[in-house]
Amino acid sequence: MALAERYWETKTLDEMTNEEWEALCDGCAKCCLNKFIDDDEEQGPTSVIKADEQVHYTNIACRYLNSHKCECTEYSQRTVLVPDCIQLTKGNLKDIFFMPTSCAYRRLHEGRGLPSWHPLLNNGKKSLMHKKQMSVRNKAICETHVDLDNFEDYIVRWPLNDLD
Ligand code: SF4
Ligand code: SF4
C-alpha cells in the first residue's frame, strides 16, 4: 500500500504501521559504526542531549556493512550475527540515544521533523543525503581491517553532524 503523504507529520512514532516505521529509516548506516560509552564521564540526568555527549562514534563499520551502498549485507540475520546490532523498534525507543542526532527516528522522537535531505522528501533517493555528507559513504573502514584494541584512534565527530 502506498504511504500517505507526509505521514510522519500527522502520526506519532507509536501510531505508525510497520511499513511506515521501516520507511522512516534514511539508510545513512551511521548506526552500523562501532561506538562506545565513556563511563568516566559524569552521568547527567536522563536526557537525550546529555546522553549524546557520552556516546563516542568511531569510523569503524560493522563487517556486514557495504559502506558504499550503506546497506547491511546480512539484514535478515543481523541480530543473530551481531548481538549489538540495534534494531530500533517502538518497544526500545529508550535506546534512541545510541542513535546519531540525524537519525530519522531520533529526530521525530525529539519533535524535530525530517531533514530536507531525507529520502522520503527526495523521491526515495539517497543521493542528496550522500552529497550532504550525512551518511557513512566513503568515510568508514571495515572492522576487519583495523586492530580493535586501538579503537580510540578511530573516534570521529562527523557522525554527530546534523543538518536540516
Ligand atoms: S541512524 Fe537511524 S536513520 Fe540512519 S540508518 Fe540507522 S536507524 Fe536508519
Ligand atoms: S549487522 Fe547489518 S545492520 Fe547490524 S550493525 Fe552490522 S551492518 Fe549494520
Image (cartoon, helix red, strand yellow):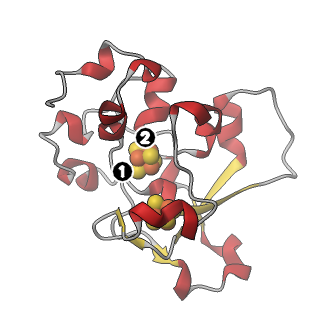
Whether the residue under disc 2 has CB within 8 Å of ligand 1: no
Residue 112: x and y in percent read: 43, 23
- The answer to whether 131 is drawn above or below residue 18 in the figure is below
What is the number of the mark on residue 57?
A: none
Between 92 and 116, the one lying in front of the other is 92
Residue 63: x and y in percent read: 49, 76
User: Which residue is depicted at the point 33% across and 63% down?
Assistant: 70
- The answer to whether 138 is drawn above or below residue 90 in the figure is below
53 to the left or right of 116: right
Q: Is residue 110 visible?
A: yes
Residue 61: x and y in percent read: 50, 70
User: Which residue is depicted at the point 20% across and 48% down?
Assistant: 128
Residue position for label 2: 162
Residue furthest out toward the top:
10
Residue contact between numbered discs 2 and 1, judged by CB atoms under 8 Å:
yes
- The answer to whether 75 is drawn above or below residue 6 in the figure is below
Q: Dividing the picture into quarters, in which one does residue 156 lie?
A: bottom right
Which structural element holds mark 2?
Answer: loop
Q: Is residue 58 visible?
A: no
User: Which residue is depicted at the point 63% across and 60% down?
Assistant: 84
Residue position for label 1: 134
Q: Residues within 10 Å of mark 2 (few under 14, many from 20)?
A: some
Indicate the quadrant containing the N terminus: top left, top right, bottom left or bottom right.
top left
Residue 55: x and y in percent read: 67, 49
- Determine the CA span between mark 2 and mark 1: 7 Å
